[in-house]
């Protein structure tokens, strides 16, 4: 199973402010949906609160240290990244997507196979940032210029 980080960052690396993503870009959102649809997504509990409702057409896995009695809301809760990944492995998914936020991206940088990052054409004063992509560890495989952003696709070096 391929583990893929997907994110959108401002040109200065900012991904969020006050618990939310501080911009709306329809084309970027469409790219996110097209890429992740039918695959499970893993997020932190702060990001879960932001999106509020589970993303449709995908299993929504949430990392939290707190106990949740059920998944009546449509979210599935896990107390570690390892447990969430095992759940997806057991279901024979070919891919899983790590969708943020900052704390979950930091963890995922150590284990992901790919990073799909949209860099927006503007900077933003945020309070959450995407971690630095170390080019000793990652190689840029594809670059796709869109109207207001560029999608970079990095693969982990072997
Ligand atoms: N631009 C983008 O692509 C993008 C994507 C996603 C999010 N964001 C932004 O990122 C910001 C949120 O990032 P964040 O770092 O503050 O929060 P986060 O990563 O969404 O959630 C953090 C929470 O997740 C839980 N968690 C994280 N790692 C865990 C682990 N290993 N085991 C168990 N629980 C774990 C903890 O929840 P508990 O406290 O419940 O234990 C922790 O407090 C928001 O501003 C959001 O808008 C941006």
Image (spheres, grey):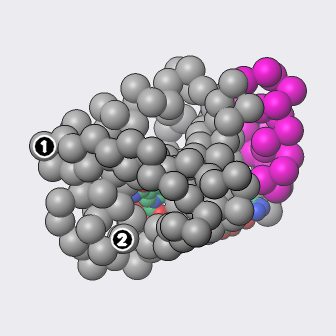
x, y percent for residue 66: 79, 60
Residue at the spot x=82%, y=55% of the render? 79
The reply to whether dot 2 and dot 1 touch (C-beta < 8 Å) is no
The boundaries of the magenta stretch are: 70-93
Quarter of image, res 18:
bottom left
On screen, residue 97 versus residue 7, left or right, reads: right
Horizontal and vertical percent position of residue 102: 54, 67
Q: Residue at x 49, y 73 (%)?
A: 132
Q: Is residue 81 magenta?
A: yes
Q: Nearer the viewer, residue 84 or 49?
A: 84
User: Image check: 112 left or right of 58?
Assistant: right
Q: Which residue is mark 1?
A: 147
Q: Position of residue 27 (x, y in %)?
A: 22, 37
| Quadrant of the snapshot with the N terminus | top right
Distance in Å between CA atoms under marks 2 and 1:
19 Å
- The answer to if 158 sits in the magenta stretch is no
Q: Position of residue 85 (x, y in %)?
A: 79, 42
**Residue 48 horizontal side relative to residue 32, left or right:** right
Residue ID for mark 2: 14
Give the quarter the ligand 1 occupies.
bottom right
**Residue appearing at x 56%, y 59% in the figure:** 138
Q: Image point 30% across, 57% down: which residue?
A: 119
Q: Relative to 77, is 35 above or below?
A: above
Q: Is residue 82 above or below residue 65?
A: above
């Amino acid at each position: 199973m391929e583990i893929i980080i997907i994110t959108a960052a401002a040109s200065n690396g900012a991904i969020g402010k006050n618990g939310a993503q501080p911009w709306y870009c329809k084309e970027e959102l469409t790219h996110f949906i097209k890429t992740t649809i039918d695959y499970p997504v893993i997020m932190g509990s702060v990001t879960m609160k932001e999106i509020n409702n589970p993303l449709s057409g995908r299993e929504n896995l949430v990392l939290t240290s707190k106990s949740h009695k059920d998944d009546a809301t449509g979210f599935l809760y896990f107390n570690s990244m390892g447990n969430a990944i095992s759940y997806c492995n057991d279901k024979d998914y070919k891919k899983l997507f790590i969708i943020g936020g900052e704390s979950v991206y930091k963890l995922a940088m150590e284990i992901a196979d790919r990073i799909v990052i949209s860099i927006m054409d503007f900077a933003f004063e945020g309070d959450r940032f995407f971690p630095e992509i170390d080019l000793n560890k990652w190689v840029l495989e594809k670059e796709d210029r869109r109207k207001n952003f560029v999608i970079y696709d990095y693969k982990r070096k072997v």
